[in-house]
Amino acid sequence: MKGKRNRNQEGLKKQLTKLLDVPPEVVSDFPQIMISGNQEITVENFGGLLEYTSQTMRLSTKCGILVIHGADLEAQKMTADYMEYNLKTGILYARGTTDTTGNTIGKPVMEQGGKSYTMDEVRYNFNTQKARITNMVTQEQDGILHGKNIKMMPDHSINITHGKY
């Protein structure tokens, strides 16, 4: 039964690629790996992070384990209900959306270096590696750090106005 369901799913994916006129990798479960020079690698469609150190990352994928070796490796991940990326400026804008009861859902969450940052909205410039963040909350050592207006610099230091710890 499971084999038949997998064949049906694969057939549906092929039909979707033809119907939507998109490359097959867009609807596949296989990892997408993009390498930019010797400074950046982007991996999409992986199952989970199995190991993370500054020298090694091991990722679970549908077709096996992907191992990345290097120096000063840093993992970053951004999720949000709404994201837009400007190709000309290199700026990513992310925010949550409003549900039918008026509550904000799917706020941006950035995971970086083992830490998680939740915010109302963010504008991240991939060219300068700077960010403008509104209402960010994160765990810092034994407390919670909250800031209303935050600027993140390329070295990941942050400047906060109206901050609380």
Image (cartoon, rainbow, N blue to C red):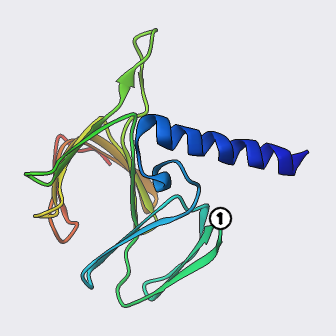
Say which of 142 and 108 sits in front: 108
Instruction: Classify residue 156 as left or right of residue 102.
Output: left
Residue positioned 49% across, 53% down in the render: 24
Secondary structure state at the residue bearing disc 1: loop
User: Which quadrant is the N terminus positioned in?
Assistant: top right
Vertical arrangement, residue 57 with respect to residue 18, above or below = below
User: Picture coordinates of residue 103 (x, y %)?
Assistant: 42, 17
Residue pictured at 80% horizontal, 43% vertical:
5
- The residue pinned by badge 1 equals 62
> Which percent across, then down, holds residue 62?
65, 64
Instruction: Using residue 127 as the reference point, say whether residue 66 is left or right of it.
Output: right
Is residue 97 found left or right of 28 in the rendered image? left
Q: Residue at x 30, y 43 (%)?
A: 136
153 vs 94, nearest the viewer: 94
* Residue 84 horizontal/vertical position (percent): 25, 40
Q: Nearer the viewer, residue 139 or 76?
A: 76
Observer-nearest of 19 and 131:
19
Q: Please identify the residue farthest to the top as the structure is shown.
A: 101
User: Pointer 1: residues within 10 angstroms few (<14), some, or many (20+)?
Assistant: few
| Tally of numbered discs | 1
Q: Amino acid at mark 1?
A: Lys
Relative to 60, say whether 140 is above or below.
above
Residue at 27% across, 85% down: 38
Q: Residue furthest right?
A: 1
Left or right: residue 127 versus residue 83 is left
